Amino acid sequence: MSTARYLTPVERERLLAAFQNPRDLLLAQLGLNTGLRCSELIGLRWKQLIHRGQPAPAFDIQRRALKGGRSMKRRSVRSRRIPLNAAAAAAIREYAFAAFGSAEPPLESYVFASRKRYPGVISRKQAHRVIAEAAKRAGLEGTVAPHSLRRVFARSCYKASGHDILATQVLLGHANFTSSAAYLMRDTTELSYVYDHLNLSGRTEVPRPTMAVAIN
């Protein structure tokens, strides 16, 4: 699995504010709000995201476009239907208007088309660079990559589902729940925070964080 780390809510806000154009912001918003893998994101076409001139409520990804969809085990991979929430829809509108004005996007074209690889798409390497450079501008440390967005999606689904690992598995498109469970593992910083806030003394009082005093 990727070593890309999880992003806290505050870090996500800083990351989203650091993107410099609507296309890159859409890449991040779709990653955060659909949980798609990098290769699945960059392979999207406008006809999947736009319906009658507006962001579609959901879109389909065929088996061949999913991880393992072209492998020897492709029979175990099923096409997926991905809902689009308000945040993703807003990002789609913003980029579509920036790129095409009031006209409808060319539906057969790739959403993340490459100027250098026309009529192809941006590479996974370029997608990683887009996220990494935004993270650097936002002052985020550690490895921040497209897979960081998928980690955020996984934990958000797990929490929203009432800690239902099977629901999380379906939303992530995993073949088994053990793969989904790996996305829920905490890093050492998070574990240290939990340990530091344990109260095993038998007292009911919860230790309060120390407040810094400003000295003028």
Image (cartoon, helix red, strand yellow):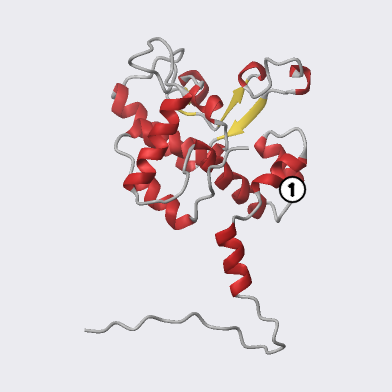
Q: Which kind of residue does numbered mark 1 sit on?
A: Ile
- Residue 77 image offset from top left, x and y in percent: 73, 23
Q: Is residue 137 left or right of residue 140?
A: left
Residue 29, quarter of the rendered image: top left
Q: Is residue 2 left or right of residue 179?
A: left
Say few, some or many: other residues with alpha carbon within 10 Å of mark 1 (under 14 / 14 to 19 / 20 or more). many
Residue 99, quarter of the rendered image: top left
Q: Considering the image in quadrants, where does the C terminus appear?
A: bottom left
Residue 178, quarter of the rendered image: top right
At x 44%, y 32%, the residue is: 128
At x 37%, y 10%, the residue is: 118
Identity of the residue furthest to the top in this view: 119
Total count of labels: 1
At x 35%, y 39%, the residue is: 133
Q: Considering the image in quadrants, where does the N terminus appear?
A: top right
- Residue 146 image offset from top left, x and y in percent: 49, 36
Q: Which residue is mark 1?
A: 165
At x 54%, y 33%, the residue is: 57
Say above or below: 15 vs 118.
below
- Residue 14 image offset from top left, x and y in percent: 37, 51
Q: Element at badge 1?
A: helix
* Closer to the camera in the image, 49 or 25: 25
Say above or below: 80 vs 139.
above
- Residue 30 image offset from top left, x and y in percent: 49, 35
